[in-house]
Image (cartoon, rainbow, N blue to C red):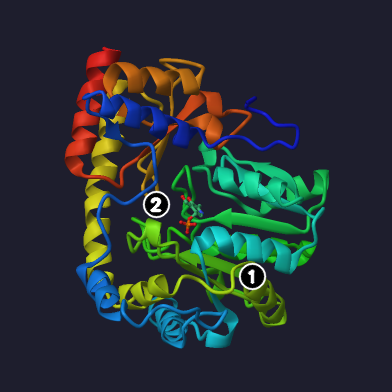
Amino acid sequence: MTDTPSDGLMPFHAMEILKRAKVIEASGRSVCHLEVGEPGSPPAPGVIAAVQQALPQAQGYTNAKGLDALRDGLVGYYEDQHGVAVSADAIICTMGSSAGFILAFHTAFRPGARIAITRPGYPAYVNTLLGLGFGIAEIPLSVSTGWRLTGADIAAAYAQQPFEGLLFASPANPTGAAIDRAGLGDIIATCERLGITLISDEIYHGLDYRAPSVSALELTKNAIIINSFSKYYCMTGWRIGWMVLPEHLVRRAEILQQNLFISAPTLSQIAATAALGERDYAEAQKAGYAVNRLALDKGLRDLGFDVSGPSDGAFYAYVGISKFSNDSMAFCTRMLEEAGVAMTPGVDFDRVNGQGYVRLSYAGKPETISRALERMKTLLS
Ligand SMILES: Cc1ncc(COP(=O)(O)O)c(C=O)c1O
């Protein structure tokens, strides 16, 4: 199979690295996993207990939009965390944020429409949009501005070739860049001025290390908000997320959900409802990531990686490898094969400049970070 099918779909190299890492582990060697963006801890014990209790009854579909208890819980979440009143009717529970993207694209646009995304950015954005028959416009970001998207970036890309939608995440994957309230206001105002529908991917909310996460809902009623229990609540495998829609889009999204997915998994909705009450547990995980964030930043800097500073949020370091290589896949393969350290090549996130970068996840245990740094030191020095 070629790496570049004619419609532009690309494999997710992180998964190829993971596959090879599993083979290496099966041969008896240990691997430090810094390649996938997954919390190392399970969900809160209260989540497991709620599911165990509900298991005998929770066998059928739910309402397409999701359980009332979960949507009411999310209304409370927006009140408590963001100080905004959201109607439970505007919320649809989805199979992770991944299903939320599919609903959002088909709700707000028609195939053929162009949606802007950032470069670097989460690879599934490009692949999902192209795979579903939408077009993309890439907005290049720069390390010199902390990889943070601005209204000026959007306007410059729009002037070159207009687009109907913008999808971006803050904090972002792979850079961890987080946009503050003023920056978000600038992005929203630019989108409103140009008639661009904004999709705000808030999956890493709660994982900002510098200031509380700001939801686009605090500033506008016109954006589509996508969120998930995968990251902050440590529930990647439960495949549960949610979206909040502007009033005029709710009914179309509901109809698409009824037909595409019927409902999000019932047990996962019960788990998610419990998770909303377990923020202390989530905060304890975040405190661990915060320690890892600084240790990895210092360690990578000492080793000679190009590090622009600890990331604002999420749990990723996106760093330059100019001292070592100009081929990020070859560098990651060497790190895996010779040092037993798995990381993701920048080409996953940026098809133009990604050869000069790698992404390391610090969502695992502190010992994994320190062992990985030791192993890299031995190989690189
Ligand atoms: C920015 C971003 N959005 C969405 C997702 C998908 O998450 P989910 O598990 O909710 O489908 C990820 C996963 O890594 C991500 O990094």
Q: Are marks 1 and 2 in contact (CB under 8 Å)?
A: no
- From this viewpoint, is residue 60 visible? yes
Asked which quadrant contains residue 344, the reply is top left
On the image, the x and y values in percent for residue 195 come to 78, 65
Indicate the amino acid at tag 1.
Ala
Is residue 344 found left or right of 275 in the rendered image? Answer: right
Is residue 220 found left or right of 212 in the rendered image? Answer: right
Q: Is 357 placed above or below 150 here? A: above
Which of these two is toward me, 131 or 59? 59
For the residue labelled by badge 1, is the local secondary structure a helix, a strand or a loop? loop
Which of these two is toward me, 129 or 163? 129
Question: Within 8 Å of ligand 1, the CB of disc 2?
Answer: yes
Tell me the residue at 50%/78% (across/down): 61
In the rendered image, which quarter contains the C terminus? top left
Q: Within 10 angstroms of label 1, few (less than 14), some, or many (20 or more) residues?
A: many
- From this viewpoint, is residue 186 visible? no
Tell me the residue at 78%/61% (across/down): 194
The number of discs equals 2
Indicate the amino acid at tag 2.
Ala
**Residue labelled with disc 1:** 223
Q: Within 10 angstroms of label 2, few (less than 14), some, or many (20 or more) residues?
A: many
Residue 314: which disc?
2
Question: Within 8 Å of ligand 1, the CB of disc 1?
Answer: no
N-term-proximal mark, 1 vs 2: 1
In the rendered image, which quarter contains the N terminus? top right
On the image, the x and y values in percent for residue 239 come to 44, 61
